[in-house]
Image: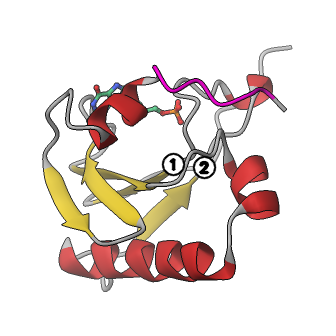
């Protein structure tokens, strides 16, 4: 597991060094619009704690952080009006997923038919 880099872009957003379009915030969680949306609604949900990825979060986060995070994902999806039409929740971990930002986050995407889960891998 890589050590946490506190210069990653989401750490800077959490410190207020870079602006964001906040959708929801509480003690443990921040949710904001993705800067390069891949769907009509594309929101990122991140814990405020310093976790590199889902692997790190699932192993080290406390129960209160995990509960707050899961509650926040559902809350944000409902707030964005996606409950009835449907949405996708996705987290990238590590090299093979092309995780770009090394601070754990999930993507919530919706607002259109999203198609298949995965592109076919290159042979
Ligand atoms: P990953 O590939 O790590 O799962 O996704 C990282 C996401 O962060 C990408 O969808 C990318 O568009 C988004 N992103 C990268 N930099 C910024 C930024 O400065 N602000 C916001 N709001 N999103 C960002």
1 or 2: tag closer to the N-terminus: 2
Nearer to the camera, 30 or 74: 30
Q: Secondary structure at mark 1?
A: loop
Is label 1's Cβ within 8 Å of ligand 1?
yes
Q: Residue at x 31, y 52 (%)?
A: 43
Choose mark 1 or mark 2, whichever is in front: 1
Can you say which quadrant of the picture contains the C terminus?
top right
Q: Is mark 2 within 8 Å of ligand 1?
A: yes
- Whether 76 is drawn above or below 104: the answer is below
Q: Which residues are magenta?
A: 2-7
Q: Residue at the location (20% across, 78% down)?
A: 79
Crowding at dot 2, Cα within 10 Å, few <14 / some 14-19 / many 20+, comes out as some
122 over 115 or under it: above or below: above
Q: How is the image coloured?
A: secondary structure
Q: Are marks 1 and 2 in contact (CB under 8 Å)?
A: yes
Q: Is residue 25 left or right of residue 20?
A: right
Q: Position of residue 34 (x, y in %)?
A: 28, 39
Q: Which residue is mark 2?
A: 91
Query: In percent of the image, x 43 and y 53: which residue is there?
Result: 114
Indicate the position of residue 78 as horizontal and vertical percent values.
27, 82
The reply, left or right, for residue 72 in relation to residue 36 is right
Q: In the rendering, which numbered label is found on residue 105? A: 1
From the image, give the main secondary structure of the stretch colored magenta.
Answer: loop
Q: Quadrant of ligand 1?
A: top left
Q: Residue at x 25, y 60 (%)?
A: 111
Residue that extends furthest to the top in the rendered view of this protein: 123
């Amino acid at each position: 597991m890589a050590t946490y880099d506190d210069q990653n872009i989401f750490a800077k957003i959490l410190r207020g060094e870079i602006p964001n379009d906040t959708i929801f915030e509480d003690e443990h969680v921040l949710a904001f619009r993705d800067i390069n949306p891949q769907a009509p609604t594309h929101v990122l949900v991140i814990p405020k704690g310093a976790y590199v990825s889902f692997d790190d979060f699932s192993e080290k986060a406390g129960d209160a952080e995990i509960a707050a995070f899961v509650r926040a994902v559902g809350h944000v999806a409902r707030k964005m009006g996606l409950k009835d039409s449907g949405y996708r929740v996705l987290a990238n971990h590590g090299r093979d997923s092309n995780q770009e930002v090394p601070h754990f986050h999930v993507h919530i995407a919706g607002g259109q038919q999203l198609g298949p889960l995965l592109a076919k891998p290159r042979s």
